[in-house]
Image: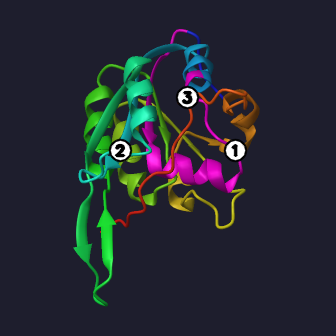
Amino acid sequence: MLFYPQEKIALFVDGANLYGAAKGLQFDIDYKRLLELFARKGLLVRAFYYTALAEDQEFSPLRPLIDWLDYNGFTVVTKPLKEYADAQGRRRVKGNMDIELAIDVMEMSEQVDHIVIFSGDGDFRRLVEAVQRKGVRVTIVSTIRSAPPMVADELRRQADNFVELHDLAQSIMRVHHHREEPTRAAPPPAYEDA
């Protein structure tokens, strides 16, 4: 990874996308280790985590993770999942966080030198291009080693750097202990971009 010691860095984690990529590579993310890794790369200004939550559940499996992130250095951005029926009448949910992430990236691009986006979503290509025009470098963290690959080719091409998530695994994977710790990702709600 190409970072400079005095560079101001902001992290943007698309929770569902990163969870899917890590699961595809068969490891769990330890978010404390992830923060520590990037704090050593430069001046970590802010770390954002984005996820949609089901409002009607008494307890969400994401709640312990969200609470841990909130108390341990992440700015957590959530919104409620939306329910709808598809053309066949099946119940579906969606909770796309792209617009929230994009707005925060644009706002933070005024204060940082380097933005790291943990997502392979091709919808972010234009966002990356816009931020680069402001002189900010952009690194995308995702994977091409899963089947299917989790990163869109157009996003990889647009980014200044692409970091293969598999190459970070040893530095950010959750080490399993006897006692469970909520610093790993819980399964995100299944939703569709719509």
The answer to whether the residues at label 1 and label 3 have Cβ atoms under 8 Å apart is: no
Q: Report the Cα–Cα distance between label 1 and label 3.
A: 12 Å
Residue 54, image x, y percentages: 29, 52
Q: Is residue 186 above or below residue 189?
A: above
Q: Which residue is mark 1?
A: 27
Marks 1 and 2, how far apart at CA: 24 Å
Farthest residue, direction top: 6
Q: Is residue 7 magenta?
A: yes
The one of 141 and 49 positioned closer to us in this rendering = 49
Toward which corner of the image does residue 14 lie, by quadrant? Answer: top left
Q: Determine whether, in the image, residue 8 is placed left or right of residue 85.
A: right
In the image: residue 75, left or right of residue 113: left
Image coords of residue 33 (percent x, y): 62, 23
Q: Quadrant of residue 151?
A: bottom right
Q: Is residue 95 above or below residue 102?
A: below
Whichever of callouts 1 and 2 sits on the residue coming sooner in the sequence is 1
Q: Quadrant of residue 163?
A: top right
**Which residue does the image show at 39% across and 58% down from the upper left?**
123
Name the residue located 29 percent from the left edge and 41 percent from the top edge. Answer: 78
Q: From the image, tell me which residue sits under label 3.
A: 31
Residues in magenta, as a range: 6-32
Amino acid under label 1?
A: Phe
Q: Which label is found at residue 109?
A: none
User: Helix, strand, or loop for circle 3?
Assistant: helix
Q: Secondary structure at mark 2?
A: loop
- Return the residue at label 2: 59
Q: The C terminus lies in which quarter of the figure?
A: bottom left
Does 170 lie within the magenta span? no
